[in-house]
Image (cartoon, rainbow, N blue to C red):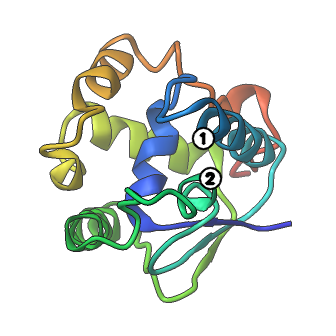
Amino acid sequence: MTVRLRAHHLLCILTYSGRGYSPAFEANFERIIEQINQGESIELVAGPDDVCQPQLASPDCHCFSDSVQERDRLALRDLSGTVGLAIDRQRIELTSQQVQQLRAGFAARTIRSACQGCEWFDLCSAVAEQDFQAANLQPSRSGCKEYT
């Protein structure tokens, strides 16, 4: 099954380390990361995605807000320059090399325009500063495809 992600969540998966809005959100995100670790492809989508699912029924759901859509726009702009991604329902077979490229850009803060003002900014920065050791996405131990 393909994992559906909005552009800014492609950035979030780089540093996700088990913390989130609620236990249901965390369990869902863990499942998504495990799918990606096992080699599932990613489909970039506009609007709510698989990560948003536990939040959609909440009265204070922010998944449709203008600020979140702006995060997606900024993330897509940054990502397009890094690994040539597009959000037009593009399927990505995430490779270890792409994860490393994305993490290098994230650590260098060249693909983090979407992260400005995010409540998780400091946590994600700390994960990046520790060479992503706490991140649950582990392409070296996963089914992520390798370039040959």
Residue 79 coordinates in the image, percent (x, y)? 33, 63
Which class describes the residues within 10 Å of circle 2: few (<14), some (14-19), or many (20+)?
A: some
Label 1: state its secondary structure: helix
State the residue at coordinates (22%, 74%). 66
| One can see residue 66 in this view | yes
Q: CA distance from mark 1 to mark 2?
A: 6 Å
Residue position marked by numbered label 2 in the rendering: 54
Please indicate whether residue 80 sits to the left or right of residue 49 in the image. Answer: left
Residue 82 coordinates in the image, percent (x, y)? 32, 60
Query: Which quadrant holds the N terminus?
Result: bottom right
Label 2: state its secondary structure: helix
Residue position marked by numbered label 1 in the rendering: 25
* Nearer the observer, 135 or 92: 135
Residue 122 coordinates in the image, percent (x, y)? 23, 23
| One can see residue 83 in this view | no
What amino acid does circle 1 point to?
Phe
Please indicate whether residue 142 sits to the left or right of residue 140 in the image. Answer: right
What amino acid does circle 2 point to?
Pro
Please indicate whether residue 64 sits to the left or right of residue 71 in the image. Answer: right
